[in-house]
């Protein structure tokens, strides 16, 4: 497998055990992240020469929580030895609840978010074997469910020892591997075990009483050789010797010329936190071989879609049939104004549908302008539209809708948005009425056929950080152990009861902070106040929250000012920016199409901007997403020793 060209990212990179193994197999590291300053020194000293772009282009990230996944370069394989202390037998085993050392317990969810956004071909994760049984298996079940069921990857795992692949060390670790494009016919296998390449006598350069060494650890040095907790004392040539980083480096599979520009104490600690290079390389070789046999999925041939994807198709063909879009008032009732539609297409289609007053549509190829005439009534009727509406409304999850097949085959397309989830303009229309005439005008699509549509989806990009002043660190467990049905509200109120004060810090991701400031320089602080009112007092209506904030100022004009600022924010989210992408201030779409629960479509357009603003301000509500999945709602101690608390900003119609 040498010299095979592929790209990978190295998360929770430590000193680069994954990097070393993947580079030997022909991989190029395009992004890495490591928070520990001493480990960063060792990483750069040893990998700068073979991965210069990583450092020249500022792609060696310090805190994985700070980067928006969209800003990570594309890559083939995600590698991550995510923090193991929360799941280790040697630690407190707090698991996802370990917030005592930054947020190391729940950083797996950062990995999941990166996989969800970047869609790599494969992932390769490593952790202590205790993660499999932690919390009676619930932790591992959560990890597997997210990767396999939510993200759609296959999932394989095996508890692997370093000695299984030639290194003289026990070091049992859970290796988790998964693939994006694997069908049920494919089956990845871990490599067969191999004999030891050398033993502990070779490591010490003398006769050692142990052939295979203990697992290298990061703490607890100095135990007597007869102590059951001993891991660093060995009998060599009838003398007791203590393990140093020199021997540990060999046991972990690092080459002799691997440098440690840090103290011996930091060096042994870094090795104890690292992966066994040979074991990683052996498994990675099988991953790469397996990838050769996988065919990338063709999204255009996907027969199952979710409600949103089917609704986009339904809106598309409904507009072809009706050739007009009625504009809505702020309560989703049609007004007398409508937009005549002359053409329907999307950014992703090679074909345009030209409409006329006749009973036909003309399909025109965007590239060669070749045309084909289709009689609408042969494939689309009001009865068919009603049937398709019922099918979508009554189905759940992802599902097949064979009723669409004839229409799709005749029209020659099967998707609207394609693989690009970062699109505000789901559909492009040539429109006209007595006020305007526009070509390729972008409209977003929102549907009430399923759950009420979201305006802003929850993710790490929508987390906001508050520093907690005046609260002793000993309160962290008391607050975080509150697990009532209203736990977020109760935790916040308990913080206040204990004398804590919330000080707004900012968005977790710089990208979100930037986008909010593009709306208004005060918007980040406004969002912080909105979140506290929502989670503390359970007020979900933006209109009511704005009134509460304005009352604090005792300025009667401030409510008008704040209302206008919030209305602008809602419009900019609907038509302009995504939380995870830096925004240029422009609106990609100039309108929105709402499919109501009865299948009727109504529209908003910027020619009636006030109506759109009023609708959003009246009907958008804050919502509480999964606090575990999105890493918020608990006190945590950051690396600066201070207490912090995060809240998430999700908006739904």
Image (spheres, rainbow, N blue to C red):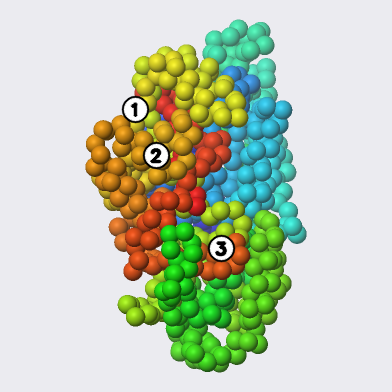
Tag shown at residue 503: 1
Q: Which residue is mark 2?
A: 545
Q: Nearer the viewer, residue 360 or 98?
A: 360
Q: In which quadrant of the rendered image does the N terminus lie?
A: bottom right
Q: Mark 3 packing: few (<14 Cα in 10 Å), some, or many (20+)? A: some
Could you say where residue 320 lies in the image, as x and y percent from the top left?
54, 80
Q: CA distance from mark 2 to mark 3?
A: 27 Å
Q: CA distance from mark 1 to mark 2?
A: 19 Å
Q: Which residue is mark 3?
A: 596
Which residue: 64% across, 18% down?
208
Reading the chain from its start, which is encountered first: label 2 or label 3? 2
Does residue 51 lie above or below 528 as drawn?
below
Q: Nearer the viewer, residue 399 or 444?
A: 444
Mark 3 or 1: the one toward you = 3
Q: Specify the quadrant of the image occupied by residue 126.
A: top right
Which residue: 47% across, 74% down?
325
Reading the chain from its start, which is encountered first: label 1 or label 2? 1
Does residue 465 lie above or below 51 as drawn?
above
Could you say where residue 389 lies in the image, as x and y percent from the top left?
64, 68
Could you say where residue 148 lies in the image, as x and y percent from the top left?
66, 48
């Amino acid at each position: 497998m040498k010299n095979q060209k592929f790209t990978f990212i190295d998360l929770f990179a430590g000193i680069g055990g994954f990097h070393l193994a993947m580079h030997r197999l022909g991989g190029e590291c395009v992004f890495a992240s490591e928070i520990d300053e001493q480990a960063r020194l060792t990483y750069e000293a040893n990998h700068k020469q073979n991965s210069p772009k990583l450092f020249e282009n500022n792609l060696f990230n310090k805190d994985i929580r700070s980067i928006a996944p969209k800003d990570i370069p594309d890559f083939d394989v995600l590698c991550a030895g995510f923090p193991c202390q929360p799941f280790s037998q040697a630690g407190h085993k707090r698991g996802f609840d370990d917030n005592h050392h930054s947020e190391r317990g729940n950083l797996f969810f950062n990995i999941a978010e990166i996989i969800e956004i970047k869609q790599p071909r494969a992932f390769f994760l490593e952790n202590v074997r205790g993660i499999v049984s932690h919390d009676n298996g619930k932790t591992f079940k959560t990890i597997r469910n997210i990767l396999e069921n939510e993200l759609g990857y296959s999932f394989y795992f095996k508890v692997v020892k370093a000695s299984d692949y030639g290194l003289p060390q026990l070091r049992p670790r859970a290796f988790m591997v998964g693939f994006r494009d694997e069908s049920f016919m494919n089956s990845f296998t871990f490599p067969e075990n191999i004999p030891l390449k050398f033993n502990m006598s070779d490591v010490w350069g003398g006769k050692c009483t142990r052939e295979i060494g203990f697992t290298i650890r990061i703490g607890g040095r100095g135990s007597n050789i007869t102590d059951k907790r001993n891991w660093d004392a060995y009998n060599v040539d009838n003398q007791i010797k203590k393990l140093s980083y020199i021997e540990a480096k060999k046991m972990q599979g690092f080459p002799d010329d691997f440098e440690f520009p840090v103290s011996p104490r930091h060096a042994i600690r870094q090795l104890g936190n690292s992966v066994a290079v040979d074991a990683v390389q052996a498994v990675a070789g099988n991953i790469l071989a397996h990838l050769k046999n996988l065919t990338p999925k063709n999204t255009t041939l996907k027969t199952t879609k979710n409600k949103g994807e089917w609704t986009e198709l339904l809106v598309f063909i409904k507009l072809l049939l009706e050739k007009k879009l009625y504009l809505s008032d702020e309560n989703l009732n049609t007004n007398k104004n409508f937009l005549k539609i002359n053409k329907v297409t999307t950014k992703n289609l090679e074909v345009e549908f030209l409409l006329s007053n006749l009973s036909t549509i003309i399909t025109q190829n965007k590239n060669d302008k070749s045309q084909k005439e289709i009689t609408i009534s042969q494939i689309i009727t009001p009865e068919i539209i009603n049937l398709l509406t019922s099918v979508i409304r009554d189905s759940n999850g992802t599902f097949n809708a064979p009723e669409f097949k004839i229409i799709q085959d005749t029209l020659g397309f099967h998707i609207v948005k394609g693989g690009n989830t970062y699109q505000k303009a789901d559909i492009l229309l040539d429109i006209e009425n007595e006020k305007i005439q526009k070509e390729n005008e972008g409209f977003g699509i929102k549907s009430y056929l399923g759950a009420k549509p979201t305006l802003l989806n929850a993710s790490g990009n929508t987390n906001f950080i508050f520093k907690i002043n005046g609260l002793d660190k000993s309160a962290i467990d008391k607050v975080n152990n509150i697990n009532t049905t209203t736990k977020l509200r109760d935790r916040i109120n308990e913080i206040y009861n204990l004398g804590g004060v919330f000080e707004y810090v900012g968005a977790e991701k710089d990208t979100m902070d930037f986008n909010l400031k593009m709306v208004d320089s005060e918007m980040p602080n406004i969002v912080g106040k909105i979140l506290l009112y929502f989670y503390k007092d359970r007020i979900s209506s933006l209109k009511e929250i704005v009134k509460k904030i304005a009352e604090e100022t005792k300025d009667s004009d401030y409510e008008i000012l704040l209302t206008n600022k919030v209305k602008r924010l809602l419009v900019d989210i609907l038509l302009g920016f995504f939380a995870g992408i830096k925004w240029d201030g422009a609106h990609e779409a100039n309108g929105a199409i709402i499919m109501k629960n009865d299948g009727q479509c109504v529209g908003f357009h910027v020619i009636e901007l006030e109506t759109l603003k009023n609708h959003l301000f009246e009907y958008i509500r804050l919502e509480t997403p999964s606090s575990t999945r999105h890493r918020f709602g608990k006190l945590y101690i950051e690396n600066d020793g201070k207490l912090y608390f995060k809240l998430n900003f999700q908006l739904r119609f």
